[in-house]
Image (cartoon, coloured by chain):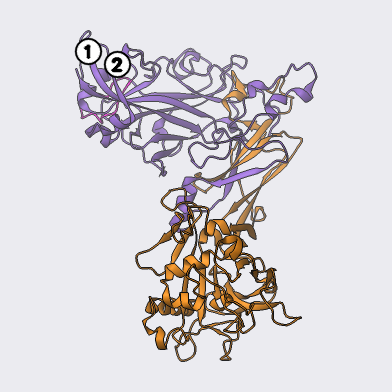
Chain colours: A orange, B purple
């Protein structure tokens, strides 16, 4: 009986899971400078979108009014109600309520609640049980799913920040830099977050020696990276001098603290006196480079299309026949030959559900057999 | 679609079709791949040079360098020409499906009338009664009575159904094997798939001789592009199948002259077409998908061109038949 279909057997199908990684580099000039920055026109860049609610700021890879623009990340800031910035004279701080709300929202999503139902604060060492190491003033960098995909690859995150004290142009503000990375997180990370796994971001000297915490200690914890959520939480104290809070209690250069804007405000003053968008503008201008590898989890079904020696040797192609005679044959004893370019995968009711194309025709005749491995990713 | 890079290792470009994605989205288990087919859509076997001076290794040199297109996601445009499995290697001839438009007594002639612009070698399908009954200014014959015009308006009793239907014959179209021979049973098509744009028309039975409108066939499946598939088998839909017998006399079905194929015969398929309700009641599809033209001595008509595709389930051989749905605009 002539036929054009072949039914898959049980051993013709298998499933696999593959992790696909892409390198995502985000240069500092995308964050600030590429799209319109005249005379320190901080916040005037056309790829930066601010919202009337003022809760966060979005960064695009192109002027956001263009349909070609892709959303790459959001930036926001916040502090805990327990922060020193929240009380006292700071009661009238600009957008104080919004900043606390932002902190609480992110903390309850990323850190969850304790046994009393209270929101857990961000913890620099991942040990939620002790009361130490809480990050009360933080910067949030939320990566778009377009970049993050399924998760950030552990151990691949790098964020370079300019921490030179003076704010007078990128060449000066980037004169001293620290690098935040999660290099130790490949096989050492935390799973006590309700949103998945997270690692600690450690700061180390990249340009100059802004971290001066003794001759042996050159790195220190400075934030958290939530891999599945695609969110980096950076402590605001990274921009403070050691005489104040420093990076998690260690010391940056202690002579002069980092000026976050032209007015010479430090990060604490920016967090209280500026709007969230204004603070985000200042922080963006301190980002020198940002890169990580994302991860896409591919679940695949592999179909092995086995074309045995006595199968698929004839064709229904109209050019295959001339007056009903097979054009590749002269006499009936010649072997039939056909050429495969396409595989079609069908349902039981003969409907085409998937197609696969070979990059070049493959000869099929009774003297050979082919196994075409068709992988469908989901 | 671009071409696949064929400069290095063989790669495979696989995609779900639009229908596959739709079924996957349904989540009802209808996305289940159970079988496969191989095809050679890009191959022109005319490039197979059996007389290449350098020998048999060079016969298919041109074929093997054929560039292959990326995979289409449209389920209709992919896997057009399937490869066949026949458990014998000594076949020199394979059956074809051929339109029996020149076969006497089958009412399968195509339109050959005068039009402006010229449009022949297709079937006209009238979509409403006014179109069917339009009288020729010259010979007073109604349009549906003309050869090549399929009455597609579901004529009311007594009007008659005209003289045209679509008839195809299957078999070996060669005079090198006498038509008195019997076609191998494993090459005979006893099941066909007919595909038609469901927005425009539906498949109906063949002319039944009593003047009443043939009953509609049941579409087995209508895909996301609104292409309907009708599976017709000789056992379940015997009225769609005509007799083709080995020629051994000059009478009736055995007469060598009453078949479109010259050699051993397989099966004959007969059917008509019924216009859709939308074409019957509206001109919107005509405006969107078609145009107007003039049939001499009849008037001006809206038209939409389409094709009916007949595929043999056994051999995978396909035949596309051009059809034109027409609606009277003005006499």
Name the chain letter of the residue that bears numbered label 2: B
Q: Residue A128, how many percent across, how many down?
A: 57, 87
- Circle 2 residues within 10 Å: few <14, some 14–19, many ≥20: many
Question: Per the image, is B100 magenta?
Answer: no
**Vertical placement of residue A123 versus A17, above or below:** below
Q: Residue under circle 2?
A: B146
Q: Residue A260, how many percent across, how many down?
A: 52, 70
- Of callouts 1 and 2, the N-terminal one: 1
Q: Residue under circle 1?
A: B136
Q: Relative to residue B277, is residue A34 drawn left or right?
A: right
Q: Residue A101, how many percent across, how many down?
A: 40, 78
- Circle 1 residues within 10 Å: few <14, some 14–19, many ≥20: some
| Dot 1 and dot 2 residues touching (CB under 8 Å) | yes
- Pick the residue in front: A22 or B234: A22
Residue B305 placement: quadrant? top left
Disc number lying in front (1 or 2): 1
In terms of secondary structure, where does tag 1 sit? loop
**Vertical placement of residue B325 versus A43, above or below:** above
């Amino acid at each position: 009986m002539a036929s054009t279909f072949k039914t898959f057997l049980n051993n013709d199908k298998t499933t696999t899971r593959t992790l696909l990684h892409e390198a995502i580099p985000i240069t500092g000039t995308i964050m600030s400078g590429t799209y319109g920055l005249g005379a320190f026109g901080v916040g005037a860049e056309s790829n930066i979108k601010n919202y009337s609610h003022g809760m966060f700021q979005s960064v695009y890879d192109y002027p956001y009014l263009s349909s070609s623009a892709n959303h790459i990340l959001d930036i926001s800031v916040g502090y805990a109600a327990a922060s020193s910035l929240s009380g006292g004279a700071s009661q009238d701080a600009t957008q104080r309520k919004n900043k606390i709300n932002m902190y609480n929202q992110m903390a309850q999503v990323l850190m969850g609640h304790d046994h009393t139902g209270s929101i857990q604060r961000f913890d620099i060492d991942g040990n939620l049980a002790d009361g130490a190491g809480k990050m009360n003033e933080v910067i949030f960098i939320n990566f778009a799913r377009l970049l993050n995909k399924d998760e950030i690859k552990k151990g691949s995150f790098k964020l370079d920040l300019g921490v030179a004290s003076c704010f007078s142009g990128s060449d000066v503000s980037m004169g001293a830099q620290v690098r935040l990375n999660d290099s130790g997180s490949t096989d050492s990370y935390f799973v006590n977050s309700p949103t998945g796994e997270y690692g600690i971001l450690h700061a180390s000297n990249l340009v100059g020696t802004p971290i001066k915490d003794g001759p042996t200690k050159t790195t220190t914890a400075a934030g958290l990276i939530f891999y599945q959520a695609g969110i980096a939480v950076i402590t605001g104290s990274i921009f403070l001098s050691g005489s104040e809070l420093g990076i998690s209690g260690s010391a940056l250069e202690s002579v002069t603290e980092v000026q976050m804007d032209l007015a010479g405000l430090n990060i604490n003053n920016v967090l209280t006196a500026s709007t969230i968008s204004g603070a985000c503008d200042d922080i963006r201008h301190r980002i020198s480079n940002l890169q990580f590898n994302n991860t896409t989890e591919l679940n695949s079904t592999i179909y092995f299309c086995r074309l045995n020696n006595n199968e698929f040797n004839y064709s229904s192609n109209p050019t295959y026949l001339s007056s009903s005679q097979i054009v590749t044959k002269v006499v009936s004893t010649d072997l039939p030959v056909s050429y495969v370019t396409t595989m079609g995968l069908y349902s039981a009711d003969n409907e085409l559900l998937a197609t696969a194309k070979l990059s070049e025709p493959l000869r099929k005749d009774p003297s050979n057999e082919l196994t075409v491995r068709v992988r469908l990713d989901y | 679609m671009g071409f696949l890079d064929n400069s290095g290792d063989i790669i495979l470009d696989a995609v779900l079709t639009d229908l596959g994605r739709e079924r996957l989205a349904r989540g009802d288990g209808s996305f289940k791949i159970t079988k496969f087919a191989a095809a050679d859509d890009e191959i022109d076997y005319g490039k197979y040079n059996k007389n290449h001076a350098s020998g048999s290794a060079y016969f298919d040199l041109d074929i093997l360098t054929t560039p292959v297109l990326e995979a289409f996601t449209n389920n209709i445009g992919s896997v057009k020409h399937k490869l066949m499995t026949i458990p014998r290697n000594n076949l020199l001839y394979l059956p074809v499906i051929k339109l029996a438009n020149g076969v006497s007594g089958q009412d399968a002639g195509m339109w050959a009338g005068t039009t402006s612009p010229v449009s022949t070698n297709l079937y006209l399908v009238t979509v409403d009664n006014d179109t069917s009954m339009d009288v020729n200014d010259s010979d007073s014959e109604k349009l549906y009575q003309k050869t090549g015009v399929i009455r597609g308006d579901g004529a009311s009793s007594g009007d008659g159904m005209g003289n045209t239907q679509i008839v195809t014959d299957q078999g070996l179209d060669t005079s090198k094997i006498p038509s008195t021979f019997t076609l191998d049973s494993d090459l005979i098509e006893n099941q066909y798939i007919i595909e038609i744009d469901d927005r425009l028309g539906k498949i109906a039975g063949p002319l039944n001789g009593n003047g009443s409108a043939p009953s509609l066939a049941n579409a087995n499946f209508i895909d996301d592009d609104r292409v309907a598939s009708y599976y017709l088998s000789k056992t379940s839909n015997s009225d769609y199948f005509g007799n083709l017998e080995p020629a051994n006399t000059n009478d009736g079905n055995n007469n060598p002259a009453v078949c479109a194929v010259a050699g051993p015969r397989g099966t004959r398929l007969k059917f008509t077409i019924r216009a859709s309700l939308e074409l019957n009641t509206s001109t919107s599809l005509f405006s969107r998908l078609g145009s107007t033209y003039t049939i001499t001595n009849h008037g001006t008509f809206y038209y939409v061109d389409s094709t009916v595709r007949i595929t043999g389930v056994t051999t995978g051989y396909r035949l596309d038949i051009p059809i034109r749905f027409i609606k009277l605009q003005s006499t």
